[in-house]
Image (tube, grey):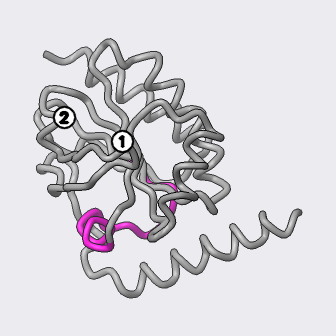
Amino acid sequence: MKVTGVLGVVSAAAFVIVSGFTSPSFALPKKGEPAPPLKVVSTSGQPISLANYKGYVLVVDFFATWCPPCRDAIPHLVTLNRKYGKQGLQVLGLSLDEGDEKGVKDFILSKRINYPVALASGDIQTDYGLRSLPTVYVIDKKGNVAEKFMGGSDETLRKMEDLVKKLLAEK
């Protein structure tokens, strides 16, 4: 294993341990309830809030550039956005690489990310109860949490795509 891979695994483990013990709202938000509000500015300078996505199915991907499973899941999200974007799917990437906007911008280019990405503040991380990476929330057209997915396994990504298709089919 390369040194960067080892560092990524160690960093991810540290994130899980630290956030697991310091985040009092790790159980929130709940399925079927309104998604917590979020207001961010994308790396391209556009203001973003959940209100921008009313009427759309939204996939919110919490990731970090140093997280190997996060990096592995991004091509699937790019494909998902390309495949279902015209049917009403929107994808939003929220990076936990605080203070490294240039590094995140370089990462966006290298991974050919085709959806908006912003840096997630500590408040957003707490509001969404992050305990591990990657964590993906699927939010329905009404702005409610449809599901939370943790990890980037093929099975998890398949289940997420199945849910997206189901939600897009709903009126």
The x, y position of residue 124, in whole percent, is 27, 65
Please identify the quarter of the rendering in which residue 40 is found. Answer: bottom left
Give the camera-side residue of 109 and 95: 109
Q: Is residue 9 above or below residue 155?
A: below
The kind of residue on which mark 1 rests is Leu
Q: Tell which residue pokes out farthest to the right in this image.
A: 1
Q: Residues within 10 Å of mark 1 (few under 14, many from 20)?
A: many
Disc number for residue 52: none
Q: Position of residue 126 (x, y in %)?
A: 28, 72
User: Mark 1 near mark 2, Cβ–Cβ under 8 Å?
Assistant: yes
Instruction: Give the residue pinned by disc 2.
Output: 53
Q: Amino acid at mark 2?
A: Tyr
Q: Residue 18 at what x, y percent from top left?
A: 48, 84
Q: Quadrant of the N terminus?
A: bottom right
Vertical arrangement, residue 68 with respect to residue 109, above or below: below
Q: Which residue is mark 1?
A: 92
